[in-house]
């Protein structure tokens, strides 16, 4: 069985490198990129872009809803296993900030044991690399998900980000 945790992380890093062509929306269009790995431009919100990374990498749905278009931060919480020790957080785990069903979800891409580096897609100028400590909403909760490939693994394109043509 193939673990695709690193592929998930590489998709998140790919998204940061292509942020000019990735838009933010909480509307119905946020799930349209799911079955189009690496196709730009694309639109997503904080939770669905994470679902995209997992799907594209061939992993099971972290929300455990067969990648339903209505998945959101709260369903990510319900689908994961809480990690109580920050030193045990791995790249590919998900940080949920805020109480109850959460206000925001980010994908962990590196962890020094104190302040994980994450990819956040919470506004139009994202996805961006941020440290967990930069989001002051509390609580910070980390969750782990199954990262064993269950379908075709798609790897991020290795081509550099494309620049939109100038209007000249």
Image (cartoon, rainbow, N blue to C red):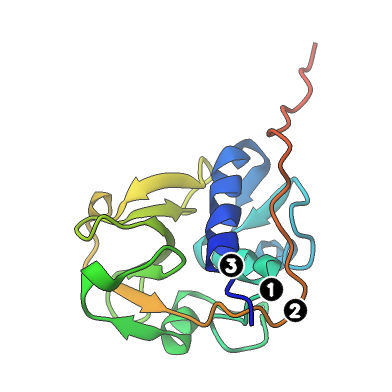
On the picture, is 58 further left or further right than 95? right
Indicate which disc, 3 or 1, sits on the residue closer to the N terminus: 3
Q: State the quadrant of the N terminus.
A: bottom right
Above/below status of 117 relative to 96: above
Q: How many marks are shown on the rendered structure? A: 3
Point 57% across, 89% down: residue: 64
Residue on which the image places disc 3 = 48
Point 78% across, 51% down: residue: 39
Within the image, what quadrant is residue 80 found in?
A: bottom left
Q: Position of residue 137 (x, y in %)?
A: 24, 62
Within the image, what quadrant is residue 35 found in?
A: bottom right
> Please, what secondary structure does the residue beneath circle 1 have?
loop
Point 66% across, 78% down: residue: 149
Residue on which the image places disc 2 = 151
Q: Position of residue 162 (x, y in %)?
A: 73, 31
Q: Nearer the viewer, residue 166 or 120?
A: 120
* Separation of residues labelled 3 and 1 (CA atoms): 15 Å
Q: Nearer the viewer, residue 138 or 88?
A: 88
On the picture, is 108 further left or further right than 167? left
Label 2 neighbour load within 10 Å: few <14, some 14-19, many 20+ = few
Above/below status of 132 relative to 149: above
Asked whether disc 2 touches disc 1, contact meaning CB atoms under 8 Å apart, the reply is: yes
Q: Position of residue 130 (x, y in %)?
A: 36, 47
Q: State the quadrant of the C terminus.
A: top right
Residue on which the image places disc 1 = 58
Indicate which disc, 2 or 1, sits on the residue closer to the N terminus: 1
> Please, what secondary structure does the residue beneath circle 2 have?
loop
Q: Position of residue 103 (x, y in %)?
A: 37, 68
Asked whether disc 2 touches disc 3, contact meaning CB atoms under 8 Å apart, the reply is: no
Looking at this view, name the residue that lies furthest to the front. 1
């Amino acid at each position: 069985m193939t673990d695709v945790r690193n592929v998930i992380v590489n998709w998140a890093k790919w998204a940061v490198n292509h942020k000019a062509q990735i838009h933010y929306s909480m509307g119905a269009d946020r799930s349209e990129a799911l079955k189009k790995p690496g196709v730009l431009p694309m639109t997503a919100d904080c939770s669905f872009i994470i679902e995209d990374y997992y799907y594209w990498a061939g992993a099971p749905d972290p929300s455990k809803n067969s990648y339903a278009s209505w998945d959101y931060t709260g369903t990510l919480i319900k689908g994961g296993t809480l990690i109580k020790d920050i030193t045990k957080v791995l790249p590919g785990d998900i940080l949920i900030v805020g109480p109850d069903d959460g206000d925001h979800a980010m994908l962990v891409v590196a962890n020094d044991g104190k302040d994980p580096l994450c990819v956040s897609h919470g506004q139009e100028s994202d996805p961006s690399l941020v440290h967990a400590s930069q989001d002051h909403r509390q609580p910070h909760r980390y969750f782990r998900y199954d990262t064993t490939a269950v379908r075709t693994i798609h790897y991020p394109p290795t081509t550099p980000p494309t620049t939109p043509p100038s209007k000249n």
